[in-house]
Image (spheres, rainbow, N blue to C red):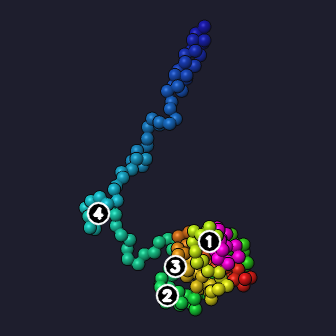
Amino acid sequence: MKRIYKITLLVGITILVSSCHNNSAPNYQYFPNMYESVSYEPYSEAKIFKGGKEGQLPVEGTINRGFEPYEYENSTAGYELAKANLKSPLDSNERNSGKGKELFEIYCISCHGATGNGKGKLVEREKFLGVPSYKDRVITEGSIFHVETYGLNAMGSHANQLSAHERWLVADYVLKLKSQL
């Protein structure tokens, strides 16, 4: 009989202990400052930093990770220099990939049209007017890359949507479309 009481007591204690556990709120934290760090306001005052504020400017000459400098300026002269001198770094295997066509169909087809004739959906619906056909322009891979990087006239820059490699792929595809017109 004593054995039944011991088993009942053990089962009761097990149920009591397991019912008090809450998975969403742990009981103890080991090194709580690792879980709940002290937050700082970026522009608040701090005596330990130069100028007395938390938010500091990057060191002069630093470049963002993944950023590739582009040496041609955003001007007509920069456009002409890029048109004359800038060459694609793509090799023959990358030029034949379908990635340039995919990117063109995502970013360019709505204005420039599927064949590059300047008759995309937005032009047909008269949202944008004056989008030129590729066959009417003297363009090179350098001029296309420059326009994709900085934009020209009503066309905005695509440098924030496309990496430099992707812009070169699109420029190569645009030249293929131009040769087909």
Residue 31: horizontal and vertical position, in percent?
Answer: 41, 45
The Cα–Cα distance between marks 3 and 4, rounded to whole angstroms, is 40 Å
Tell me the quadrant of the picture where the N terminus can be found. Answer: top right
Q: Is residue 166 left or right of residue 65?
A: right
Crowdedness near tag 2: few (<14), some (14–19) or many (≥20) residues, C-alpha within 10 Å:
few
Question: Is residue 94 at all visible to an observer of this figure?
Answer: no
Q: Amino acid at mark 2?
A: Thr
> Looking at the image, is mark 1 or mark 2 earlier in the sequence?
2
Residue 49: horizontal and vertical position, in percent?
Answer: 29, 65
Crowdedness near tag 3: few (<14), some (14–19) or many (≥20) residues, C-alpha within 10 Å:
few
Closer to viewer: mark 3 or mark 4: 3
Q: Amino acid at mark 3?
A: Asn
Instruction: Please say if the residues under marks 1 and 4 sit with CB atoms less than 8 Å apart.
Output: no
> Looking at the image, is mark 1 or mark 4 earlier in the sequence?
4
The one nearer the camera, 11 or 97, is 97
Q: Which residue is mark 4?
A: 53
Q: Which residue is mark 2?
A: 76
| Numbered range of the magenta stretch | 105-121
Question: Is residue 20 at all visible to an observer of this figure?
Answer: yes
Closer to viewer: mark 1 or mark 2: 1
Which residue is rendered at x = 72% and y = 83% of the image? 181
The Cα–Cα distance between marks 1 and 4, rounded to whole angstroms, is 50 Å
Please tell me whether mark 3 sits on a helix, a strand or a loop.
loop
The one nearer the camera, 169 or 38, is 169
Crowdedness near tag 4: few (<14), some (14–19) or many (≥20) residues, C-alpha within 10 Å:
some
Crowdedness near tag 1: few (<14), some (14–19) or many (≥20) residues, C-alpha within 10 Å:
some
Q: Which residue is mark 3?
A: 153
As displayed, is residue 65 above or below residue 7? below
Which residue is the extreme one toward the top?
1
Q: Which residue is mark 1?
A: 123
Which image quadrant is residue 141 in? bottom right
